Image (tube, rainbow, N blue to C red):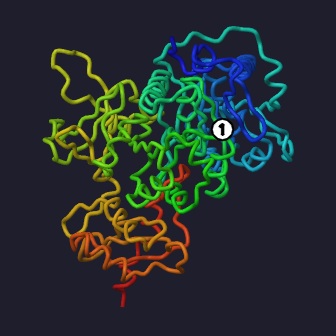
Amino acid sequence: MITLLHHLVLHNPSCRGDDEAIRFRDRALTYRQLADETRRFGAGLLEAGLEKQERVAIYLPKRLETVVAFFGTSWAGGVFVPVNPLLKPEQVAHVLRDCNARFLVTSGDRLAQLEPALEHCHDLHTVVLTDSGDGDETDLPRRRVEWDAFLAGGAEEAPPPLIDGDMAAILYTSGSTGRPKGVVLSHRNMVAGAQSVAQYLENRREDRLLAVLPFSFDYGFSQLTTAFTVGASVVLMDYLLPRDVIRAVERHQITGLAAVPPLWVQLARLPWPEGAVTSLRYITNSGGAMPGEVLKALRQALPSTRVYLMYGLTEAFRSTYLPPEELDRRPDSMGRAIPNAEIMVVREDGSPCAPGEPGELVHRGALVALGYWNDPERTRERFRPAPGRPGGIPLEETAVWSGDTVRMDEEGFLYFIGRKDDMIKTSGYRVSPTEVEEVCYASGLVGEAAAIGLPHSQLGQAIVVVATPAEGAERVDEEALQNHCRERLPAFMVPLRVITEPTLPRNPNGKIDRKQLALRYQDLFSEESSP
């Protein structure tokens, strides 16, 4: 029975020892080799003094050692902390200090850049280097050991006993406003999530998944766990250009590809060779709504590929999915609850909303995380008692109150309206930025688009669309886009301004960062009204 995360590779009857588990470029590990290196890395941690539930930060791009470190930490009873490799040294140091990391796994070159920021990471006592790099030795009091030596010198002692409620990982959110917060996940959270997703995606041992998203993103990490659940294989990739993703799909005969909307927007514009078209069994989208025109283009390019539209949040990993057979009937739906989860739409007092009535999405079940690391105040705001439980149960069950506004139709399908923090309040109305963006994409006049609300003396907030030009254009035609919006939206939803940018900023998980754009242009209308 699989109850702990590392059981997915060590005690999983679906995994065959000689089958390829992970591949990075020309290197690969079979399941037998991955299990062996997992134990050896874990033994190295125990030999170096890791105590049960201590944190091991892993600051690496996607490579074989990264995966070994994740599952080896789990085997040793530690808690792994994937650190997005795009973060800057001060951001990395904040994560290490916040979670009191005792170990850091990184490369020599990364350590050389990071070292000055580690001065106040007093809990850090051992750095494991995947290579020596070019960094010079420093006087900072911590042990350094190279990868091969670490795996060779592990003790024979058994790991500490664990149960599925113990911590397995801390995933730090992108922190677009303020410092990032660490979501604490148990073994139960991660195993239940992998099993649920593998069930509705119908994953099988023959699948080959392409991992292009960062492992610090729960959606990216799940490419490992859903594959390992069924004994499938994963190809690791850090791409430079979107066309590299399509080439990798063809080269490795990828059957499953997960991405976020900004990447799908780029992939939808590119030609897909026959080898990629025939191999790709399914694609998935999460991290934001898939624009309708992008979905249409992808379905035309990949006519035999099943498309799964999904919704999730780090605090509960995955909440809903839309079965591919429902795409034509309700392409704007985020679907229904995933297996082993209950999704409710409730009013502020916790009472259930009527069909079609907007309310807050609440998620209950085995995927609900343990809270935010060392942050009881924000934990109380988001993790609250589940509504609608029988009064005779003395102990309260914790659910995740998402902060997202949705509605549910008569058949139980959900539709996203907006995030509380993202909703634009203009002329007394609440406007979902995704609804405005969807209309902009349908115009064919933009490459990528983000709708934001900016302070305005008369409107409260004015709707502004920041967009990249469509392919072949130098600028976005502001007048044409506004006219297109007027034909399809009520007057209060038509953007007051359209701003052309060559690229749109992204957070470390690859999503368009609306908050950064809002900060960049926050004085736009105050400057225009100045004498």
Foreground: 273 or 208?
273
Percent of width and height locating residue 461: 29, 69
Residue appearing at x 44%, y 44% in the figure: 307
Residue appearing at x 28%, y 40% in the figure: 361
Name above or below for residue 221 compared with residue 52: below
Percent of width and height locating residue 249: 63, 46
Of helix, strand and loop, which one carries label 1?
A: strand
Foreground: 269 or 357?
269
Percent of width and height locating residue 22: 68, 32
Foreground: 237 or 246?
246
Amino acid under disc 1? Val
Residue appearing at x 50%, y 80% in the figure: 475
Mark 1 Cα-neighbour bin, 10 Å: few <14, some 14–19, many ≥20: many
Q: Judge from the rendering whether residue 62 lies leftward or rightward of residue 226; answer left or right.
A: right
- Quarter of the image for residue 50 reads top right
> Disc 1 designates what residue?
235
- Quarter of the image for residue 453 reads bottom left
